[in-house]
Image (tube, rainbow, N blue to C red):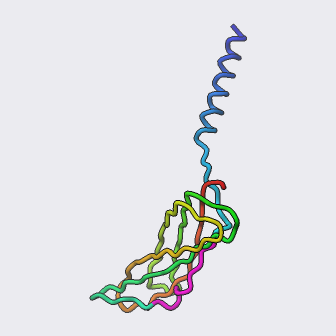
Amino acid sequence: MNSMRWYIWIVLVVFACVLGAGCMSTRIQNTAITVLSDDLDSFTPVNVGSVDFYTADFQLENPTNKTFENIEVQVNLMPTTAYCHSQSATFDISSMTPHQKQKETFSFSEFADLDCAYNFTSSVTSDQP
């Protein structure tokens, strides 16, 4: 009877390990892909009534000799002035080949005549190469 208990515990532990291994993500933080933007401090908004529309361009680059797949780029814009609002965007990219450059555009709106400027942070994840 005592050996049967050990057998049940061993089966439960093995089952938990198998279940845990199947639930683990293959996504990793990708520090190789770079995200740049040159126009966040010199926006020229388009005014429509009481709203200004802004467009930010982000240049993504894979400077390595590896191909990355299932890339997710999270960009967070933080205003440099107190009256503007923080913004965020997520770009999903199926793959980036070695030395590929790509432009992504993010549009958003603010109340009119605020003359907003932003700093940004980015986070890139992808499948393991």
Q: Residue at x 58, y 74 (%)?
A: 101
Quarter containing the C terminus:
bottom right
Residue 39 counted in the magenta span: yes
Quarter containing the N terminus:
top right
Residue furthest left as drawn: 49
Does residue 120 sit above or below 112 in this rendering? above
Toward the viewer: 70 or 110? 70
Tell me how many marks there are: 0
Give the x, y percent position of residue 85.
44, 79
Q: Residue at x 43, y 82 (%)?
A: 55
Does residue 114 sit above or below 69 in this rendering? below
Give the x, y percent position of residue 23.
58, 41
In magenta, the rendered stretch is 34-43
Give the x, y percent position of residue 108.
40, 78
Q: Which residue is drawn at 55% across and 66% down?
A: 73
- Image-based side of 33 in relation to 54, left or right: right
